[in-house]
Image (cartoon, rainbow, N blue to C red):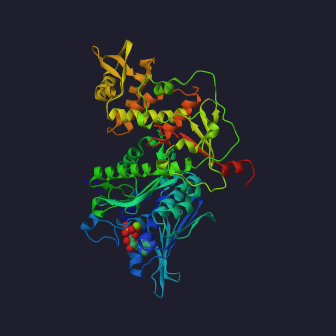
Amino acid sequence: MSRIALLPEDVASQVAAGEVIERPASVVKELVENSLDAGAHKIEVMIRRGGSSMIRVVDDGTGMDRDDALLCLERHATSKIRTGLDLAAISTLGFRGEALPSIASVSRFRLTTREHGALAGTDLAVNGGKIEYVRDGGDAPGTQIEARSLFYNLPARRKFLRTENTEGSHVEHQLHLQAIGHPDVGFVLINDDRVIHQLPPAANLIERIRDLRGAALAAELLEVADEEIGGIRLRGFIGKPGVSRSSRAHQLIFINGRAVENPTVNFALREGYHTALMKGQHAVTFLFLDMDPAAVDVNVHPAKREVRFRDPSEVRDVLIERIRRAIQGGRREWSATFSTPAAASGLKPEFPTSGPVHDGYKEAAAESAPPLIPVHEQVTLRQDWAALPIQPMAEPAMPVRLEGSPKPEADFRILGVLGRLYILMENADGLVLVDQHAAHERILFEELRRRMETQGVPAQRLLMPVTMQLSPRDSDWILQNMDTLQKMGIGIEPFGPATWKLDALPQFLKGYDPAPLFREIIDELRETSATSSRLRLGEDVIATTVCRHAVKARDVLREPEMVRLIQDLLRCELPYCCPHGRPTMIQISYAELEKKFGRKA
Ligand code: ADP
Ligand code: MG
């Protein structure tokens, strides 16, 4: 007896709809994409009760004639591709011809549409996949689609909808994606009669970002210059170092105008930011990647959320390089804010005159140890603080570029130390706080990397070598990273089965208990290898771990060490964050202070 039967059309549609239409936000996505494909200049989205009760999208695009209005409800009916060949190079947002029939099969659906210049439009309604009526309609040119009572005929699916608030915020996120992706199009979002967004067409991307996400976020972004390398054009904005979020929701990337999620891209962003991104945090990006449509396959996921690159490694390399360059370029801007000439002030700096001196930094700077910065760059330390060159305030403070400034430290005036950790300074903009611990880590990190590339870090033999037993897996990590460890000044060698002998440490870690340091290095290697690349993995993990150990918070720095620390920090490649991505310096401007003290609204 045969057991196979063809499904009735309406059931088949519901099955198909399940893939495309997951929740109200998917309806909004598909409808807005259609409006964009129809060349709309203005798109209005209105929802009720998170979209579960009603979703309406109104556009001023091309509209459809009567035949198309009926045909668009059929499955696999599309105006966007014609043959299988077209699938290989898709330049529209839609192409599957599935969205409208899917939506119509799981909601009470109404479509009104009119072509520009047409005398009459079409008004039709579909209920659970069956056409209820078709008649002339008289609305403005464009298309208006309404989906009420989503999943009313699929109780199982309806049960899976979350609270109105949650569904509403998914809709909002979807609208953000489309609005960022198409700054030249005006968008309106209305939720239960409340206007959530009213976005006029924007002149450019940053204006749209400002309108949508606020000036504060826009000010925290770096521009990625519009440039094409090897057929891959990249442009947009990314968060400055230290700007990050705990979720990927703020990491927007558009490939040929389509918001997508792609592991290659995620990986490249992380690599590009490298030490400028805190562990476990995600970058904030508004990036546009444009390339030959034939080089990306968008026909991977029913909701078109994923893409595949023909040559992922090329995309990855271009992205990494461009992000890295943008971040390096951000250094100039950063220095400009942090190096404006200091305001005149009668305050006398106060320094701790007793107490233990910070070992790590002192050691590194001391005569006996090799100097941390090349000798020709060493600057004689100023003792006469009051005599620091101070520009009169009358003259408008001109931002001075650090690179051109012979003594960048002259732009700051050290006021004292807070909690034995934060160095307080003033500059023309107000107060500057330096986390001396983070600053020191950054300096050491860059120095270690420089040394590893050249002669290696000087090692110091341990008086008492330590032997450690490690699991086979951990032993493997060590074997793989032997070279790096050696260059880092860490001497280790096999000492019997699964046993290792540790007999040297970097000089600046003299007197340090080697066992805990080593355990930590292994832990970090193990953890990072799961999430990051293998390219520079070993080197950086080891360097950051060593840095963390070399620097102990809450140690007291004396005045000359403090000056030296600031000097060294300002010379770093990425001075604004420690190798773990945390900020090294924070500026609190006079404007912020005045606001806090209620002097200014
Ligand atoms: P796809 O977008 O993949 O082609 P859809 O089911 O989303 O499939 O839409 C089917 C067709 O209906 C589209 O190809 C397009 O021709 C037409 N259409 C849909 N929405 C609109 C709209 N807002 N304005 C003009 N035409 C539209
Ligand atoms: Mg579509």
In the rendered image, residue 381, in percent from the top left (x then y), is placed at 54, 34
The front one of 94 and 69 is: 94
Count of numbered tags? 0
Q: Residue furthest right?
A: 598
The front one of 155 and 558 is: 558
Q: Quadrant of residue 511?
A: top left
In the rendered image, residue 503, in percent from the top left (x then y), is placed at 35, 16
Q: Residue at x 47, y 29 (%)?
A: 548
Q: Residue furthest top?
A: 464
| Quadrant occupied by the C terminus | bottom right
Quadrant in which ligand 2 is drawn: bottom left
The front one of 477 and 129 is: 477
The answer to whether residue 235 of the structure is visible from this angle is no
In the rendered image, residue 154, in percent from the top left (x then y), is placed at 47, 57
Q: Residue at x 36, y 49 (%)?
A: 320
The vertical placement of 402 against 66, above or below, is above
Q: Residue at x 51, y 34 (%)?
A: 380
Q: Residue furthest bottom?
A: 119
In the rendered image, residue 77, in percent from the top left (x then y), is placed at 35, 71
The vertical placement of 439 against 118, above or below, is above
Q: Quadrant of residue 422?
A: top right
The vertical placement of 461 against 172, above or below, is above
Looking at the image, residue 142 sits to the left or right of residue 542; the answer is: right
The vertical placement of 232 against 589, above or below, is below
The answer to whether residue 120 of the structure is visible from this angle is yes
